[in-house]
Image: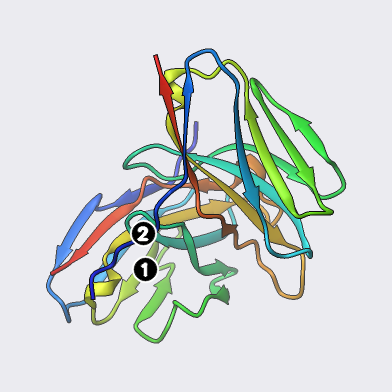
Amino acid sequence: GENVGLHLPTLSVQEGDNSIINCAYSNSASDYFIWYKQESGKGPQFIIDIRSNMDKRQGQRVTVLLNKTVKHLSLQIAATQPGDSAVYFCAEKGNYGGSQGNLIFGKGTKLSVKP
Amino acid sequence: EPEVTQTPSHQVTQMGQEVILRCVPISNHLYFYWYRQILGQKVEFLVSFYNNEISEKSEIFDDQFSVERPDGSNFTLKIRSTKLEDSAMYFCASSESRAGGDGYTFGSGTRLTVV
């Protein structure tokens, strides 16, 4: 049958505003999380990562927050720019039996930045 | 900056035909991966490869799929008898270690269209 696909959540922000993208993960055994940015027609591009022994990590204009209690991850982008428009995925990696580094991706959020 | 290179960028094939997707991972990386992304959906893990053998595979990676590292630089994904539902973007990735981080690099993908 026809592959309808998933409807991506969309976040629309004004240029210069801050953006917050949220992600829920499923496996409490996951110990490493990554945010990726994917522009149209390109592969996922690393933004920032965080290990489960931390609850916050900052990069250039980006901050990742991890709440292990509710298995929630967020990505904050400061002073959002038009070049930030893309689909953002969170990914988790487990450190459990035999895991060889494969990533489990979330559904993605489409960020649209209005000039 | 080192990058993962994938060829071709777009492949159209008849249902039932065999296709080989090619990847050149980053030269000092030891772990290699294939992922796929059906249009509008999340990125899904297919297989990981280390020390010349498959280290982990998902339920998607059935007997129709195989991977090979035929020489010191290429990493290939073969689909023996393509089906319509194999239409997707296929991403190759490589990493220096299992730890991940910004050393876990994706290629730009091959768009496979099965008609």
Question: Label 2: few (<14), some or many (≥20) within 10 Å?
Answer: many
Q: Are marks 2 and 1 in contact (CB under 8 Å)?
A: yes
Q: Is residue B29 left or right of residue B75?
A: right
> To which residue does mark 2 refer?
B90
Above or below for B22 versus B55: above
What is the chain identity of the residue bearing mark 1?
A: B
Q: Position of residue B79 (x, y in %)?
A: 30, 75
Asked which secondary structure carries label 1, the reply is strand
Number of numbered tags placed on the structure image: 2
Above or below for B81 versus A57: below
Name the residue rendered at 28%, 67% in the picture: A3
Name the residue rendered at 50%, 80% in the picture: B59
List the single residue furthest toward the right: A53
What is the chain identity of the residue bearing mark 2?
A: B
Name the residue rendered at 69%, 26% in the picture: A59
Residue B98 seen by the camera: yes
Q: CA distance from mark 2 to mark 1?
A: 9 Å
Q: What type is the residue that disc 2 sits on?
A: Tyr
Q: Nearer the viewer, mark 2 or mark 1?
A: 2
Front residue of B72 and A74: A74
Q: Quadrant of residue A27?
A: bottom right
Say yes or no: labels 2 and 1 on the same chain.
yes
Front residue of B66 and A79: A79
> To which residue does mark 1 refer?
B77
Q: Position of residue A52 (x, y in %)?
A: 82, 50
Q: Is residue A14 left or right of residue B11?
A: right
Q: What type is the residue that disc 1 sits on?
A: Leu
Asked which secondary structure carries label 2, the reply is strand
Q: Quadrant of residue B53?
A: bottom right
